[in-house]
Image (cartoon, helix red, strand yellow):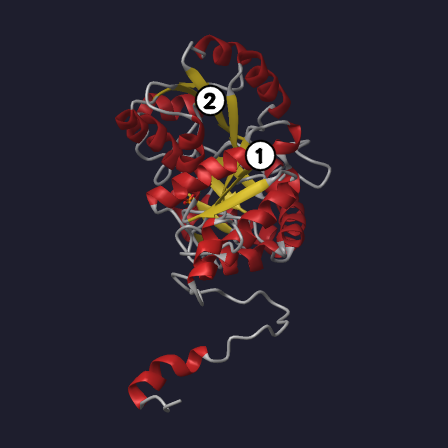
Amino acid sequence: MRDVSFETKVVHQSQKNKNNFTSKASPIHQTSSFSFKDLDELEGYFEGETPYLYSRYGNPNTDELGAAVAALEGTESGAASSSGMSAILAGILAVVKNGDHIVACDDLYGGTYHLLDEELKNFGINVSFVSFANEEEVREAIQPNTKLLYTESITNPFLRVEDISGLVQLGQEFNLFTMVDNTFATPYLMQPCREGIDLVVHSATKYLGGHSDVSAGVIVGKENLIQAAKQKIVSLGGNLSPFEAWLTCRGVKTLALRMEKQSRNAQAVAVMLKQNENISKVYYPEGVSERGNGAIVTIELSQQCNIRTFFASLGWIKIVPSLGGVETTVSYPYGTSHRNLPAEAQEKLGINERVVRLSIGIENEQDIVEQFFQAIEKSC
Ligand SMILES: *Cc1c(COP(=O)(O)O)cnc(C)c1O
């Protein structure tokens, strides 16, 4: 056969070494599409013999992430997506359509609140927001066209722990789907699918990734529901990039180590702050799991403290409007995540200018406690 010219070689040479080396880490399939040697093989994709055609429809790295989280959550199937928000939208659209109604918890993550309150209206889907702390309120909000109950396993920023089994019972009684955002708890602390929740979503941007270097989402549940959610991800273009899926899978490997250490550190910080007279409120849940109570602590500084001085006196602890990384960070709900809520809603939830949310990291426990203590000393 004729030796091909330089222009052809330069394109094809690097592809020659496709191989089956048994690399210890998963290879990254950083590809938009897959190739076929003949029409039989192409036909094989549509017959279900080979799994991949085009990365928006599916990719080994994104599938690895979906399957890993499904296994950790103790359920059948999972799909990864470009962000927590796209996973939430895909999950909702998998079970709800034009003309249906959703009953949602009233202290949801701000982005989710906006999606449900504003965007879904344009799809003809209406949402009632009620306090899920009160089962009567939830029951009263259920209408004949209600299809879904939606909440978070641990809420933001006041860390109310949802009664998952109560929610499952209510869903069964009224024949409704149930969906839970398990971002704050992670499957290390809570596994809502095991208790009968239909769909669990994650912002993998937070603890699953764990290193603040990816935006990603995951949705898990029974096979038929995940197939439906995956179809939405495909149609809406909400697929995750292979590299980000790969990074998130790498993060997931250390989830247990991180959550164990971060929960222990958070417990120590909560104990210290509860004893401090300059802190008027400490929100830190109890009894979440025998493994711990999570790594978020929310506090309210006393009236005499200067909030600006507090934020400016935190040394190596940075102000970051997110959570779940290995570094200890602080965020300001009043100035960021809950900024656009009406004043009455802020007041009802307990958001004011003295509330600070702490995302506790993996550093030395005493160093973290000491750094917060110094900031309090300077500002109060
Ligand atoms: C961050 C977050 C989201 C949104 O996730 P993105 O990855 O930013 O799209 C949803 N729910 C909770 C509880 C979150 O903390």
Above or below 275: residue 50: below
Viewer-proximal residue, 55 or 332? 55
Q: Nearer the viewer, residue 229 or 146?
A: 229
Q: Secondary structure at mark 2?
A: strand
CA distance separating discs 1 and 2: 16 Å
Q: Position of residue 25 (x, y in %)?
A: 60, 67
Tell me which residue sits at (31%, 90%) in the image: 5
* Mark 1 neighbour density, 10 Å: few (under 14) some (14–19) many (20 or more): some
Asked if ligand 1 lies within 8 A of label 2, the reply is no
Rendering coords of residue 268 (x, y %): 66, 45
In the image, is residue 85 above or below residue 4? above
* Residue at 60% in and 57% down: 363
The residue at which mark 1 appears reads as 222
**Residue in the picture at 51% in, 57% down:** 60
User: Badge 2 is on which residue?
Assistant: 148
Q: Is residue 353 shown to the viewer in this render?
A: no
Q: Which of marks 2 and 1 precedes in the sequence?
A: 2
From what the image shows, is residue 377 above or below residue 180? below
Amino acid under disc 1: Lys
Q: Measuring from the top left, give residue 135's x and y in whole percent.
A: 54, 13
The amino acid type found where label 2 is placed reads: Leu
In the rendered structure, the answer to whether residue 114 lies left or right of residue 173 reads left
**Element marked by disc 1:** loop
Furthest residue in direction right, as rendered: 290
- Report whether residue 179 is seen: yes
Residue 265 is left or right of residue 375, and the answer is right
Identify the image quadrant of residue 99. Answer: top left
Residue situated in front as seen by the camera: 7 or 234: 7
Q: Is residue 374 left or right of residue 24?
A: left
Q: Nearer the viewer, residue 341 or 183?
A: 183
